[in-house]
Image (cartoon, rainbow, N blue to C red):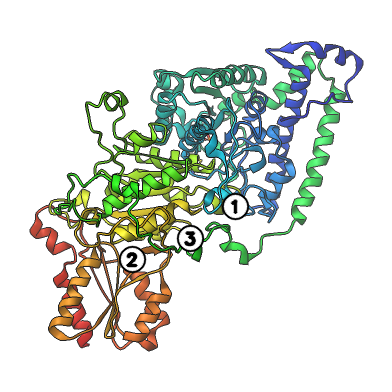
Amino acid sequence: MATTKVDPKLNDTNIAKMAKTYDGLTTQQLIDAYRVMFTSRRVDDREILLKRQQKVFFQISGAGHEALGAAAALALKPAYDWFYPYYRDRALCLALGATPLEMLLGAVGAADDPSSGGRQMPSHWAFKRLNVVTQSSATGTQILQAVGCAEAGRYFARHRNSTQKAAGDYRQFKDVQFQDDEITYVSLGDGTTSEGEFWEALNTASNRRLPVIFCVQDNQYAISVPVEVQTSGGNISRLVSGFPNFHFEEIDGTDPVVAYAAFRRSADYCRAGHGPAFVHAHVIRPYSHSLSDDERLYRPDSERQADAARDPVPRLQMFLLREGILDEKAINEIEREIEEQIQADADRALDAALPQPETIYHYVYSPDLDPTSAAFDTHPAPAVPEAAADAKPAAASPSKSSPNKASPNKTMADLINATLRDEMRRDERIVIFGEDVADASREEYLKQKVIKGKGGVFKLTSGLQIEFGADRVFNSPLAEANIIGRATGMATRGLKPVVEIQFFDYIWPAMMQLRDELPIIRWRSNNAFSAPVVVRVAIGGYLTGGAIYHSQCGESIFTHTPGLRVVFPSNALDAAGLLRTAIRCDDPVLFLEHKRLYRETYGRAPYPGPDYMIPFGKAKVVQPGTDLTVITYGAVVPRALQAAQKLEREHRVSVELLDLRTLNPFDWDAIAASVKKTNRALIAYEDSLSWGYGAEIAARIADQLFHHLDAPVKRVAATDTFVAYQPILENAILPQSSDLFRAMKELAEF
Ligand SMILES: Cc1ncc(C[n+]2csc(CCOP(=O)(O)OP(=O)(O)O)c2C)c(N)n1
Ligand SMILES: [Mg+2]
């Protein structure tokens, strides 16, 4: 917050005027606002100079938006409320307590840049001590995360015990803080309101009455595209006005008095628990979009001059003079002092130590908890605990297999359900949401016992809402970005969302969150923030009728994303052990569950107990062998096993079959050891062949094991098509046991 000390440069007359207030703002607060706004403008100017001197590498300004930021900070509290600002919020960050030096360290990309340690462009704010959460360059991704952040605050207030730290899992490294009347502030530009995630966020904040202030900073342009192209009718306030439970403000955002009053009313509304607020602020953008843009190419002088007349910095200066709050001399003093400070800060920033190249791998993953370590290697406990016994028997699914209820051996579906249940009992920070995952959103039907409840389209979350309540297990809207964006915001606060994407085929609306946000939050903030979410996804084909949109794989798209752990179990026991590791670890995990394996006879097992874990990056030797190595995972494992057994029977070829189990990290040591022994390698996977997961493994074998090879490295995979509906086509497209048999035989005979 801006300093509240009385400025020593004030004269007697002006001190007498200090008692007067302007819509609740004291004269001292106005002076402080001026300091912040002038500082913000001057840091922009300094960065622009440094950019022209090629001492910094990018510049985007907060010019024209300063009054809004200064006013918002007066109505909100740093390190109490939460902030998801966007790049124009320099004045907000300064007013909350960030310093010009910190910003200039960001501009030069210094090692001590508190926002990212030189990893992000300047103006991508993150100040952990102030609750300013790391932001990306992707317009609009912050909005759903802010919603999740607000949900986490509410959750902690209702589940106070869950805030306790606990040894042995991610909680040890996740401090939780919350306030009963906290607010989450999120800002965005007028152009960004065109992003679908904006609407998804408003919808959820409205529906759940969340204490979020959405601040749309409308400078009429998104780079060169004017607001009437973005927004039907040219005014976003009109479009959003139908959302229930909102407090709405549409204001002149260049006037700090007006803006403060609007934020004050909005904050009061949110803190009282009525719901979210929407502040639509009309501002100006006097410095083009960024230093890479020249607005004279698309804005005539007349328009630019009209904007200049509303410039908030000279306007507030005139106001202070006109009201006799400061005289010219006092203003000059303030400005000179700020200029000197920024000059000194710029000199310090230019001298600051730069990040060392060898640090680039720091914080891709948690430095605190290593899911490949022995701490995650436990043995199955023989007793069948209550949770496993509770596990619902399999219901309708695309799988053709039927469960054997009498057998102590449980399906993968059963064990995933039991693992979720036991982990939720153990860790109150776990929340589960997604499409259809609840037993029933209309809870009264469950209470009246007139329905049994659904619990997921594959019933993997069955019974969890009934046991843990709708606070912890609930349905999301049909919007995948909504699921991942909110989960990311929640996890940043210390919750452990274990969310579900119903079908891998429909993961794509969440792709921006999954590629540009969730896995990079830790790295881009230089370890200040992290979001260890578990994303469970039903994946894969062999369904007989699954067709194009219920059969897709595509795991290599995610193994190609640094920061994301990717797990793909092939049997019930592995699913239980790996899911527990995923939940307890401190990294984001994509947990791929093969639909065909959910209720397969292959790979059933008794429940391994509430502490069974398998470390990531450890392959399983499904069957040892000496003549060739087959490297595979997921639903290809049982098919490869069948082929290997046939080959042994009919041709006495001994196949070593490796089930990778986790795809990132993957067990290179196991692959290398096996290929060194057999001198022949086949990589088999269900996804389409080209550019797939096998390409990387094949390349590494060729690169590092060339001298051990007696034959070319082979791949068996799906055709380079999508999966078709008619079973004849599906069989031809997906790799079958017979395809694997043929390829193994050829490789053995080479
Ligand atoms: C998802 C995405 N698309 C495109 C861009 C490139 N881009 C950066 S800023 C910007 C315009 C944003 O306009 P607006 O939301 O009005 O904010 P302003 O810069 O005007 O304050 C665009 C298109 C981006 N960063 N992210
Ligand atoms: Mg704009």
Residue 15 lies, with reference to residue 545, above or below; the image says above
Q: Is residue 216 above or below residue 516?
A: above
Measure the alpha-carbon separation of dots 2 and 3.
Answer: 21 Å
How many numbered marks have been drawn onto this rendered protein structure?
A: 3
Residue visible at 50% across and 62% down in the picture? 375
Q: Sequence order check: which comes first, mark 3 or mark 1? A: 3
Kindly state the secondary structure of the residue where label 3 is placed: loop
Q: Position of residue 133 (x, y in %)?
A: 58, 41
Please state which of the two labelled residues, at mark 3 or mark 1, is closer to the viewer: 3
Of the numbered discs 1 and 2, the one sitting upstream in the chain is 1
Figure check: 156 above or below 113: above
The residue that mark 1 highlights is 527
Q: Quadrant of residue 127?
A: top right
List the residue tagged with mark 3. Answer: 371
Judged left or right of residue 436, residue 563 is: right
- Crowding around mark 1 (Cα neighbors within 10 Å: few <14, some 14 to 19, many 20+) is some
- Name the residue type under label 2: Tyr
Q: Is 749 left, or right, of 92 in this rendering?
A: left
- Identify the secondary structure beneath mark 2: helix
Graded by Cα atoms within 10 Å as few (under 14), some (14 to 19) or many (20 or more), the crowding at tag 2 reads many
Picture residue at 27% right of the left edge, 41% below the top: 456
Quarter in which the N terminus is drawn: top right
- In the rendered image, the residue lying farthest to the right is 12
Of badges 2 and 3, the one in the foreground is 3
In the displayed structure, does residue 156 sit left or right of residue 310?
left
- Which residue does the numbered mark 2 point to in the structure image? 693
